[in-house]
Every structure is written in C-alpha cells, then in structure tokens.
Image (cartoon, rainbow, N blue to C red):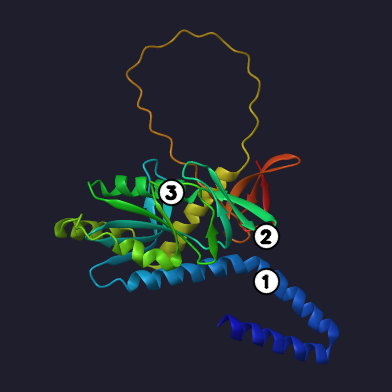
Amino acid sequence: MLVIGLLSYIIVLIILVKLNFYVALGFIVLTSIVSNAYLPQLKGYVGERRIRKLLESLGENVKIYNDLYVPKKNGEMTQIDHILLSPNGIFVIETKNYTGWIFGSENQRNWTQAIYKKKSNFYNPVMQNNTHIKALQNYLNMDVTLHSIIVFSNAATFKFKKPFQQAHVIQTKHLKRTIKQYTTQEISDEQLSRISKIFHTLIPETKQQKKEIKKRHLEHVKEIAKPKPAKKNVSKVKVEPITAGPAIVEPASVASVATCPKCGSNLIMRNGKRGSFYGCQGFPKCRFTRDL
C-alpha cells in the first residue's frame, strides 16, 4: 500500500511538472505541510489497527475492548488503547508506534527516542500504563490479575540495560507470543461475565457520546498542561494549630500526559536555552511548543 501511494505521488508530480513547474512546486509544499500535520496521527491509527487485528486472531475465548475511557478515583478519565479479557487474566495494552532507538528504564520518568542524531523525550509508558491499571482495578473493584504490555513498532530498537518487572515492553511481532505464554486460568467464568458487563458500560452507545467523552478528556489534559500562575509573596502569619479528625490523603496519581492540539501526540517536558517548556513528542515533524 505504501509503495502504491509513493508511485501515485511520483506520477502526479511528473504530470504537474510537465504542465507547470510552479504548480508542481506548490503541490510539493502543500503535501509536505499536510504530511507533517497528519502523518503522526495516521501512523498511530495504522499501528493501533494492526494491534486490533493481532488480538482478534487469538480466538473466540477472548474479548477485546479498544479505546476505552475509564473513570479514576478523582473523577477524571484515563484512556486505554486496548484491553484483552481472557480466562488467563486481563491484558492492558499501551501502543507506541515509535521507530528508532528507544532508551529508558522502568523508574525513569522520561524515555528517549533517537533517530540518527535527532533525540526526543516521551513520558515513560510503563508509568503511563500503571495509571491505567490502577484506574481499572479501582473501577472493577475485584481481585483479578492484570498484565501490563507496552507495544512498540517493529521498527523500534530497544536499548534497555535492565529487564522490566512491572510490564512487558515488546515489539508488535511479539505480542501474540507474549499473551500466549499465560496458560493458567486466573479468572473464573462468573468473573469473566461480570467484568465483560462492566466493560460494556464504558462503551459509548453513539459516536456523538464517544466524541463528547474524548473532548472532555482532552480538555482536562490541556488544562493540566497550562502554565500555572506565579505564586505571590505573602507575608507569613503565625497561626495556632487546629485539632481535627484524621485527614484522609489520596495517593498522588502518575502525572497525566498532555496532548498536542496540532497533531494529537503527547506533550512532554523539554529543556532549552531559555528554560523548561512543553514540546510535542512528534518533533521534528511537529514543532508545537507551550510554555510552562
């Protein structure tokens, strides 16, 4: 398909060059702009479609849920790419359609993608998927086994120094083999039925409902990414402590990752000559930035 598209592009370009050189030049500029704007989204869509096909080929005794928005304790939503429900556990799958060399460790907040001499950082997907799993555990409120899987493109080359304990970090071609290694039944038939019904409640009934849920989620993510106002200097006033009942402190969740309004990729924190800022992980194809 890619070869056919490239050949079609070349044929159209040759025809335009013969008709008018400046028209051909304009065509190149226009297609370049469109490509930079939409190519990251297209790659992500193609990657997720490939994952869906692989999961569907695992047989009839599994159920697959794609692009689910799961409520968190604080009322926010977290988006999960794929969930595979099977007697051998629940597999929570985060897809990263990245190429190049991938550097990182389990407890490192940001990982690095290197393509030749160009490097870009992105939020640790193991931590990201841990947030999904915690939200799912809380929403299900059941003692069931959940497996974390991070799937990269087959074109990615891992440069990890240590094995992972909290998740499987693999290429797409190893997804089926990773899931099939779990052969012991961990979830009863009764639990499978209950969990399936719960997951179905998270599926929007209409496309409009799905758009609204996605819109609210993106608005919240963008709100988090907005720069916070500087704290005003306030003179300290000594106050007497007030005795009250025990305070209940919720554990802080893993930091949410903002979304680039230009291409839909994640926004990640970067350091530059003028200090820290948010930049699109699709750089250099997308050069969107936002101040802290």
Is residue 177 rendered to the left or right of residue 239? Answer: left
Name the amino acid type tagged 1: Val
Per the rendering, the mark at residue 116 is: 2
Q: Secondary structure at mark 1?
A: helix
| Nearest the eye: 112 or 245 | 112
Write the residue at 42% across / 48% down. 164
Q: Is residue 132 above or below residue 8?
A: above
Q: Secondary structure at mark 2?
A: loop
Write the residue at 68% across / 84% down. 9
Q: Which quadrant would residue 74 be assigned to in this image?
A: top left
Residue 13's spot in the image, x, y percent?
74, 86
Q: Is residue 149 above or below residue 40?
A: above
Closer to the chain start, of discs 3 and 2, is: 2
Residue 291's spot in the image, x, y percent?
68, 43
Per the rendering, the mark at residue 163 is: 3
- Crowd around label 1: few <14 · some 14–19 · many ≥20 (10 Å): few
Q: Is residue 86 above or below residue 218?
A: below
User: Which residue lies under the disc numbered 1?
Assistant: 34
Q: Which quadrant would residue 287 be assigned to in this image?
A: bottom right
| Nearest the eye: 54 or 260 | 54
Residue 21's spot in the image, x, y percent?
85, 85
Residue 268's spot in the image, x, y percent?
59, 48
Report if the CB atoms under discs 2 and 1 are less than 8 Å apart: no
